[in-house]
Image (tube, grey):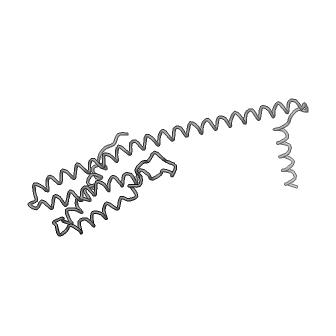
Amino acid sequence: NNKQILNDERKHSAHALYSTKSDGEESEEDAKKRIQQEIFWAKQKAMAAQFEAKEDAGVKAENREKFAKRRLALVSDTVYFSVLIACLLWLASANPFVTISYLFGAMSGTAYSYGLGKYVETIGGSIDDTEIEGAGIGQARFAFLILLFVVVGKFRDQGLLEIPSIMGFFTYQLASLGQGLKEIDD
């Protein structure tokens, strides 16, 4: 009984909400208005989606540009610290192979930091992003470290030293620390 009473009340309230006059033209008019409203709101949704897509593309391009500047700053800071430390090693060390070994390691570290930046730039992108050029070097960034060990091992008997080469490679960490300590006003 309770279910039947509830169903009757629902039917009565639904009938009261959607009651139409017995005139057939008026119901057609209501249907036309409803269809026009649906078309209007569909167009509004499409327009909002279009504006959102344009805004997202603009924000992505702006963020990609900011990151490219920071990536370039990291590489240039790596070169700066490498040259500075190489000059200090040239003055402090009697053995010129210390400086040469350090510079070889620093060149590998600079190439690694460039590749690391390219790899990070591809994170979050899709396969359809054609704007990211040179992303393949990011995948091969460990080749610079392997190449460093192979060359140092091969030319060890000619005077190339392991420790200064490895220290030169990790100079990019100093530049990374310097980038982390900079205040960025975006």
The answer to whether 110 appears left or right of 53 in the picture is left
Q: Quadrant of residue 186?
A: top left
Tell me residue 100's x, y (percent).
17, 58
Q: Is residue 58 shown left or right of residue 83?
A: right
Q: Is residue 122 above or below residue 97?
A: above
Q: Residue at x 60, y 37 (%)?
A: 48
From the viewer's side, name the closer residue of 52 and 93.
Answer: 93
Q: Position of residue 67 (x, y in %)?
A: 38, 45
Q: Residue at x 56, y 36 (%)?
A: 51
Q: Is residue 156 left or right of residue 35?
A: left
Q: Position of residue 39 (x, y in %)?
A: 71, 35
Which residue of the protein is positioned furthest toward the left in this rendering? Answer: 94
Quadrant position of residue 91: bottom left
**Position of residue 14 measured from the top left corner of the image (x, y, whole percent):** 82, 42
Q: Quick check: 129 above or below 103?
A: above
Judge left or right: residue 134 versus residue 110: right
Nearest to the observer: residue 137 or residue 167: 137
Q: Quadrant of the N terminus?
A: bottom right
Q: Residue at x 48, y 47 (%)?
A: 130
Q: Residue at x 40, y 50 (%)?
A: 134
The image quadrant that residue 163 belongs to is bottom left
